[in-house]
Structures are given as structure tokens and as C-alpha cells.
Image (spheres, helix red, strand yellow):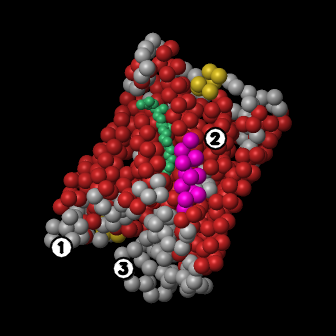
Amino acid sequence: MNDTSTFMKRQVFLLTLVPVVLLIFGIYHGLLQTLYRAGIIQASSFLGIEYYQGLTAHGVINAIVLTTFFAVAFGHFLVFRLLKEAPNAKAVQASTRLMLLGSVLAALAIFSGKANVLYTFYPPLQAHPTFYVGLTLAVVGSWVAFYSWIPVYLNFRKRHPEQKTPMGIVGIFSAFIVWQIATVPVAVEILFMLLPWSLGWVDEVNVTLARTLFWFFGHPLVYFWLLPVYVMYYTMLPKLAGGKLYSDFAGRFVFLAFCVLSAPLGLHHQFADPGISSEWKGLHTVLTSLVAVPSMLTAFTLAASLEYAGKKRGAGGVLGFLFYQPYFDRKKWLFPYLMCGLILFIFGGATGIVNASFSVNKVVHNTAWIPAHFHLTVGGPVFLGILGMSLKLLAWSRGVAVKLTRAAYMVPYLWVCGVMTMSSGQFIGGLLGEPRRTNLGLTYLNRSSEMFRSDWQFSTMMAVVGGVIMTIAMITYFVIFFHTLRQTESAEEEIEFAEPLHDEDIGFVRNFRPWVIAGAIACVIAYAPPLLEIFRTQSGGAVAYSPSSPVPVQGSQQK
Ligand code: HAS
């Protein structure tokens, strides 16, 4: 093995190991959430960690740190493997260091109780400056990783002008183009609003503007989570199923369409916010229905690919192919991680469309329905894809084989049982009006409180049962991960890419540039008018609050 390969493997190893270790805390605080909410814990803190502190750790670790570290690690792997050249070593190292430093700073702020602001860090909740600085460094680190891949890609294009860019590269570059677009507004929010406010340089913050900039970031963020997993779906799943990708064009079109459609629709998270006219919310509703199209296209393309594989094995009938897949093949233990994710995404996607309806959103907004939706999207296909591929990357980077593969393929099935049970409870609770982000054990699920709601007992207990099953799945996963980590015997873990069945050669999906330009124009059209409206109509701002008190915080957090 040469030095470059050793170096790349070491970086991928670090970027895979660190978030999985942090995930132990992330998962623990997830379980605690279900216990607080069902009234099994009736206190504002448990083992020295406060409810909102734990919820912040849960969201930041699982939804921001794990996903970003994974995307960079997987991107390094794809660039190195598919373009057969390593990115600049200094840039790669600087990126890893920035991400690690940023995460340590953010973790210090959270675990010292000075950043109880949840993963959305909406003002007027205020965190210690190290939280904002930490997040910024982690994001800048991920930018540096992306910039280090661009010269490698350009070299590849120069050396192989007639060859198509490998689909995995189109996918991971699309993810980072979406990330680049998304992180500009949140950088503006943090650097020009939240950080000066947290440092005490200004007393007040414009909440509507901050929330709008956050959701300008927050919605494309979900596609930044999703696209690396779509890379696995398009480039690996058909091969694991024993077939081919039904259409090469469909995959490329889907990735590039996300570069245009991911960002200009964040107002669907703010339907209930005052200060933004219905016209702009309506426009974002229409754009939201458009972003479901690439996912519907994905559903059809993947179903066709699975059908091709199933029929090759002798399946008949319309849905017979579903019974001819390698669900229990130990050698193909990655298959159920991807397939279970797809099944969960059917429900996650459908409930997303419910959320996106301007009027129906009023019924579900800020209720337990919303975490149910996102545990079937980011906690479904995204999380399972990350878990499966992290095992592969760990083995690849250490030159060993994944161990305990029988247990490895059971993890996604357990996870599906757990997350479906938990989310069903949350969907039911949400429709009964159960609020999200609330320590119900102090009030509504506490028999001694006059606010006690007996009709929320069943749904919250269902969430506990789901949460316990999910925790068992994750304990199993950690055992497999750390057992594989301890292996010393050299072996090669297979990571294979699928060939296309229909290899269409269509010019307009060969170049990123027109899609990026269209994405930028779409953002200006969708966001310039509401932002101008906010600037024109807002007066005054908000002082800092903490999530557990209705009165403002005295002085800023860092004092
Ligand atoms: Fe969402 C809230 C709308 C997708 C994550 N979403 C959230 C939040 C998160 C999140 C984290 O419009 C909470 C934010 C917070 O803390 O406040 N979401 C949508 C829509 C989609 C969508 C329209 N969301 C996602 C994805 C996420 C994610 C993906 C993470 C990765 N979401 C919303 C809205 C809100 C929201 C509102 C705000 C609600 C509120 O009031 O606060 C769409 O992109 C969904 C399209 C997907 C599909 C599914 C395609 C199905 C596939 C599987 C096929 C299966 C096969 C297997 C092939 C249409 C690809 C074969 C098997 C057979 C049986 C045939």
C-alpha cells in the first residue's frame, strides 16, 4: 500500500470513528427523550443533564455532526476510488482538523450546559459563542474537503474528455453543491447576527430574519443528508440486488435536479411564522411539490432496478420481484440497510407531502407528528445508509473485514421495527395535539399535574417501546463496529458499483454549470422578495431567552 493510500485511509478512518463514538451519546439522549415524554422521567434533568441540553446533544450529534463527517468521509472514499487520484493532502488534513476542532468546541458548549438551543439554534434561544464558532469551523472544514476534490475532478475531465463522470462523483458533488448553497445563509446568520449577539456586542436579534436564514439553510440541509445515501441507492443497491441500474440518465438527472430544487423552498418550515406574506409561503409550497419529483423518479428507477434483479432470479408477477431479493444473505449484509431505508422513506416521503400542504400543515406543525416524519427520513434511509456504509468505510480504511455479519444484517430490521413503532406513536400523538420539544413528564404526562392528558398516554408509551427497540438495534451496531475496529487480520471488504442497464448519453446531464446557475437564480427568485419584506417591515428585536424559562436571560450567556 503506498503512502497516499495510507494517508487517505487514515483520514477516512478518523472521520468515521469520531462521529460513531459521539453517536453513543446521541442515541442515549434519544432514548431519554421518549422516557421524559412518556412521563417515566418526571424531572427537568437526568443524571446531571438537563432535558433541553440532552435534546440539543441528540439533534446536533445525530443530525449535524454524524451526517457532515460521514458525507466528507464518503466523499474522500468516492473521489479516491472512482477518480483514482487523491486530493491535496494538506487540504484534506486541514479539513479534518477544522471539523474535529469545531466539533470539540460545539460539544464543550453543549455538555457544559451553555448551548441549550436545540439543533436549529433559533433565537431568542442563545448559546455561548464557542457553540457558534465550533459549528462555523466544522462547516468551513467540510467546504475545504469539497474544494480539495474539485482539481481532482477537473484533472479527470481533462484526461478522459469522452468518458462520463462516474455516477458516484456526480452524486457526491451534487450533495456538496447543495451544501455550499445552503451554508451561505447560515454563515450570514451566525457571523452577522448570532455571534455578535452572543458576544454581547448587540443586545437584540431579529428573530424572523434569523429563522428565515436558518431555513434557507435547513431545507437544503436535509438533501445534503439524503444525497450521499442516494449515491448508495443508485450505484450500489442494484449491484447488491444482483442486477443493474435501470437508467443511468435518471440517476444523473435526479442528482442535478436537487442542485436546483433543494434550496428555494425553506419557507414551508415557516408557514406559521408571522412577518412573511402568504404569497411567498404559497410560492414555496409550489416549489416544495416540485422537489418531491426527483424522489418519485428515484422510487420508480430503483423499483425498476430491483425488478430487473428479481426477474433475473426467476421472479414472476407484478410485485414478485420483492420476494426475490437478498434480504438474508450474510455476504450482502449492506442490502437490508439500503432496502429498509427505502421502505421507511415511502412513509417519510408521504408525510413530508402532508407537511408541505399550506393548510394541512396547521394541524401538524410543532406537534409530535414532525419528529415522526423526520425519523422516517433522516432517521430512516439517511441513518441506515450511514450506518451500513460506515461499517464498510471502517473496514476499508483499516484493511480488515466487517465482523459479526449475521448481527450486521439484523440491525436494519430491528431499526425498522423500532422506528416504525416510535413514529406511529408520534403520528398518533401529533394528531391528538401532543407538542414536540416538550418535557411532557413535568406536566401533561404527570398524573399529579392538573394539565394531565390521559389521551396522550398510549401514543407516548408506544414511542417508548419503539425507542427501546431502536436502542437495542444500536447497541448491536456498536458491538459490531467496535469488534470490527479491533480486528488485525488483513482482508478486503468488497464495495462494488453497479453498471447501468440503459446507458443513455444525454448532453444536458453532463455538466454541473447550468444546474448550479439555475439553482442560484431559483434562490434569488424565491428568497429576495420575502427577505426584502422582512427588512422593510421588522422593527426591534428580541433579547436572549433560555428554553426552560419564560423570562429573558439576564445578560448574555458567556458572562
Ligand atoms: Fe421533511 C420537516 C416536507 C423530505 C427531514 N423534514 C422536516 C424536519 C426534518 C425533515 C428534520 O413542508 C423537521 C425540521 C424541524 O426540526 O423543524 N420533507 C418534506 C417534503 C419532503 C421531505 C415535501 N424531510 C425530507 C427528507 C428529510 C427531511 C428527505 C431528511 C433527510 N419536512 C417537510 C415540511 C416540514 C418538514 C413541510 C416542516 C413541517 C413543520 O410544520 O415544521 C420530500 O422531499 C419527500 C419526497 C419523498 C418521496 C418518497 C419517495 C420514496 C422512495 C422510496 C421508494 C421505495 C422503493 C422500495 C423503491 C416522495 C424513494 C420498493 C418497495 C416497494 C414496496 C415497491
> Which numbered circle lies on residue 255?
2
Residue at screen point 41% across, 19% down:
320
Image check: 47 left or right of 478? left
The crowd level at tag 3 (other Cα within 10 Å; few <14, some 14-19, many 20+) is: few
Residue tagged by mark 1? Answer: 450
Residue at screen point 65% across, 22% down:
502
In front of the other: 207 or 109: 207
Residue at screen point 74% across, 43% down:
512
Q: Nearer the viewer, mark 1 or mark 3?
A: 1
Amino acid bearing label 2: Phe
Q: Quadrant of the N terminus?
A: top right
Residue tagged by mark 3? Answer: 549
In the structure shown, which secondary structural element does the residue marked by tag 1 occupy?
Answer: loop
The x, y position of residue 311, in whole percent, is 48, 15
In front of the other: 156 or 109: 156
In the structure shown, which secondary structural element does the residue marked by tag 3 occupy?
Answer: loop
Q: Is residue 421 visible?
A: yes
Q: Is residue 138 visible?
A: no
**Who comes first in sequence, dot 1 or dot 2?**
2
Q: Is 136 rendered above or below residue 308? A: below
Range of magenta residues: 281-293
In the structure shown, which secondary structural element does the residue marked by tag 2 occupy?
Answer: helix
Q: Is 208 rendered above or below residue 236? A: below
Image check: 486 left or right of 295? left
Pointers 1 and 3 in contact (C-beta within 8 Å):
no
Amino acid bearing label 3: Ser
